[in-house]
Image (cartoon, rainbow, N blue to C red):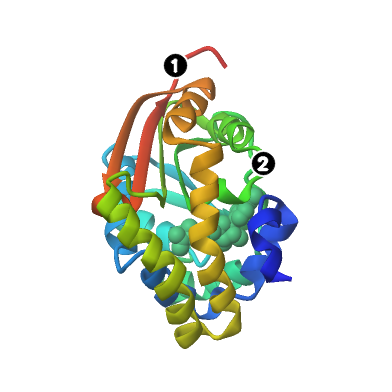
Amino acid sequence: MHDRLPTEARSERAARRVFAALPHRYDRLAELLSFGQNARWRRTMVDHVVATSPTTVCDVATGTAGVAIELAERSGAHVTGVDVSEEMLSIGARRVTAAGLDHRIDLRQASADRLPFPDDHFDALTFTYLLRYVPDPATTLKELARVVRPGGRIASLDFHVPEHLLWRTAWRSYTRLILPVGGALLGGAAWWRVGAFLGRNIDAHYASFPVAAQLDAWRAADIGDLEVTVESLGGGIVIAGTVGEGGR
Ligand SMILES: C[S@@+](CC[C@H](N)C(=O)[O-])C[C@H]1O[C@@H](n2cnc3c(N)ncnc32)[C@H](O)[C@@H]1O
């Protein structure tokens, strides 16, 4: 079933299916998938939010709760992690307990498209590697912005396709060759399929939803003051902005 990931991955059901098979070695493999850069990119994203000293933060697509834990450790905030995958969340819950953060982090199973929170509920929000899995990224962005109070910060992290020809060629070799093989060696068949699918999925995402169109979608969701940081020669991208003071 994972062989059909490239065309079927943009739905909540498909995302659940993909991530059901992955959580056990997810964190080690996330480093492989990001050329060892994931932790650094994540820090840059979290910097944007902790700089605003939030009291409450929502981390959407929290997966195994790595971002939620970093947010709690680096701020005084109460963090709510949200994900569609029960399997990812159950590893996340163990990691939260192991970090001694049960009193600071709640995990909820829900979709980014229908967040179970009232308007303006959180001071800030993060989301990581999410928009490639949702059917309508612009609508999802509006839903994410809805639950953040005016003036609150939203920050995101995702993979990106390097623009420079040399780095793009190296990136394509890495994603098409090393990722599937490395994934298989570290995580078996499920990770071979993810490794084989990921590069094509990232390419297709930016072909249909280039960064300029993404920034327009952030603005259409009433998120302004946008800051874009392209990481690691173009392999990752952090986008951050502030929810508008009115207009919603
Ligand atoms: C690549 S993982 C990233 C996990 C985590 N943010 C991290 O950086 O370690 C992507 C996560 O997005 C979740 N996801 C996919 N579609 C979703 C949706 N519609 N709503 C909430 N979570 C979703 C998946 O279940 C998965 O846990």
Relative image position of residue 151 (x, y in whole percent)? 40, 24
* Residue 56, quarter of the rendered image: top left
First of labels 1, 2 by sequence position: 2
Residue 245, label in figure:
1
Residue 113, label in figure:
2
Q: What amino acid is found at the position of numbered circle 1 in the picture?
A: Glu
Give the quarter the ligand 1 occupies.
bottom right
Residue positioned 58% across, 69% down in the render: 88
Q: Identify which residue, 59 or 57, lies in the foreground.
A: 59
67 on left or right of 75: right
Tell us which disc is closer to us: 1 or 2.
2
Whether residue 189 is situated above or below residue 205 in the rendered picture: below
**Gap between marks 1 and 2 measured at Cα:** 22 Å
Q: What amino acid is found at the position of numbered circle 2 in the picture?
A: Asp
Location of the C terminus by quadrant is: top right
Location of the N terminus by quadrant is: bottom right
Q: Is mark 2 within 8 Å of ligand 1?
A: yes
Total marks in image: 2
Relative image position of residue 216 (x, y in whole percent)? 48, 24
Residue positioned 70% across, 64% down in the render: 4
Tell me if I can see residue 107 in this picture.
no
Residue positioned 37% across, 54% down in the render: 71
For mark 2, give the secondary structure.
Answer: loop
Residue positioned 29% across, 63% down in the render: 37
For mark 1, give the secondary structure.
Answer: loop
Whether residue 132 is situated above or below residue 219 in the rendered picture: below
